[in-house]
Amino acid sequence: MKFDLSAWPEVGLRQVRSAFRAVPLKAYPELAGYSRAEIHEGLAGQGGLFLASDMARLLTLKAGVRVLDLGCGEGTTSIFLARHFGARVFAVDEDLPDSLPLRASRAGVGGLVTPVRADARKLPFPPGSFDAVFSMNAFFYFGTDDLYPPYLLRFLKDRGELVIGSPCYREEIGADAPEEFLLEFPACLAVHSPDWWRRHFAKTGEVEVLHAELHPRGAEFWEDRVRFLLEDRPPEGMKPGMRNMVRAIIRMLNRDEDGFVSHFMLHARKGKPIKLQPNHG
Ligand SMILES: C[S@@+](CC[C@H](N)C(=O)[O-])C[C@H]1O[C@@H](n2cnc3c(N)ncnc32)[C@H](O)[C@@H]1O
């Protein structure tokens, strides 16, 4: 259903609720007890802790594993991974807020979350430091250079895992892409299709790409985010940057007919793909 923007910035909640789907909390038993606000609070992109949970499900996480949360923003996913799995999380962002240690200790995981303010392209860690890399709604800002995957893989242990969850286009866009799809231009030029991401990592020859697909809720995550933001406060109460972003997302969703703007997840394991030997016995 299209959302009528003619009265913008006035919006009625009834119109918001009928135009945009909300991800059902019951689909995520691991998030029982979280409110919708807690699913989205402190997260800058779509999917909230729903997407973080789906990404975590792909990984083999257990107490003590060392995780690099790359482009962690406020570190909400770092706290989540530490709280739910007992992971030792290194929360890396070039623009990390000072508040993370306090938030982590209030969540009972102050000893498990290490804030690191750093550029993802100049990581201050020795090779083989991590069991897993986790990167949500951030990787396209710094990770599309052909040389970046081999650089990043250095920091993983052998057989270590990587998971990315992020916005995507179903297929690569060209110069004729509808203007409404070019959200956050020019950053959107680094938004790619799941197949592009698969090749980006597979061509290193250093990983086995286990999953690189559209997320089944990929389009819904956009709607869920817009719905949360508009239920949280009317556009007049938003900062101008956020208000413009919400409007731009609505225009994009209005233009999209069939889930072309979506989200994907990629899961890869460091090490050469294991080739099965033919059995001549
Ligand atoms: C859309 S936000 C997502 C943040 C967080 N992962 C989340 O889900 O809320 C993208 C983040 O990537 C970070 N970022 C962009 N380029 C970066 C770089 N070169 N090195 C480190 N962080 C970077 C930004 O500072 C920002 O916090």
Image (cartoon, rainbow, N blue to C red):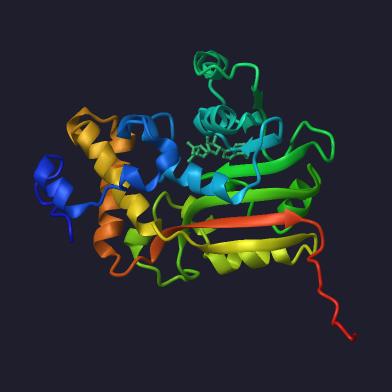
Above or below for 169 versus 144? below
Judge by depth and name the residue closer to the eye, 95 or 161.
161
| Left or right relative to 125: residue 142 | left
**Residue at horizontal 22 percent and vertical 38 percent from the top:** 230
The outermost residue toward the right is: 281
Q: Position of residue 261 (x, y in %)?
A: 39, 61
Judge by depth and name the residue closer to the eye, 78 or 152.
78
Instruction: For residue 46, say whether it is visible.
Output: no
Which quadrant: the N terminus? Answer: bottom left
Q: Position of residue 67 (x, y in %)?
A: 68, 36
The outermost residue toward the front is: 281
**Residue at horizontal 67 percent and vertical 36 percent from the top:** 68
The outermost residue toward the bottom is: 280
Which quadrant: the C terminus? Answer: bottom right
Instruction: For residue 277, say whether it is visible.
Output: yes
Q: Position of residue 154 (x, y in %)?
A: 81, 46
Q: Position of residue 129 (x, y in %)?
A: 80, 36
Judge by depth and name the residue closer to the eye, 251 or 267.
267
Quadrant of the picture in which ligand 1 is shown: top right
**Residue at horizontal 52 percent and vertical 31 percent from the top:** 80
Above or below for 132 versus 91? below
- Residue 181: image quadrant is bottom left
**Residue at horizontal 40 percent and vertical 57 percent from the top:** 218
| Left or right relative to 221: residue 196 | right
- Residue 170: image quadrant is bottom left
Judge by depth and name the residue closer to the eye, 146 or 193.
193
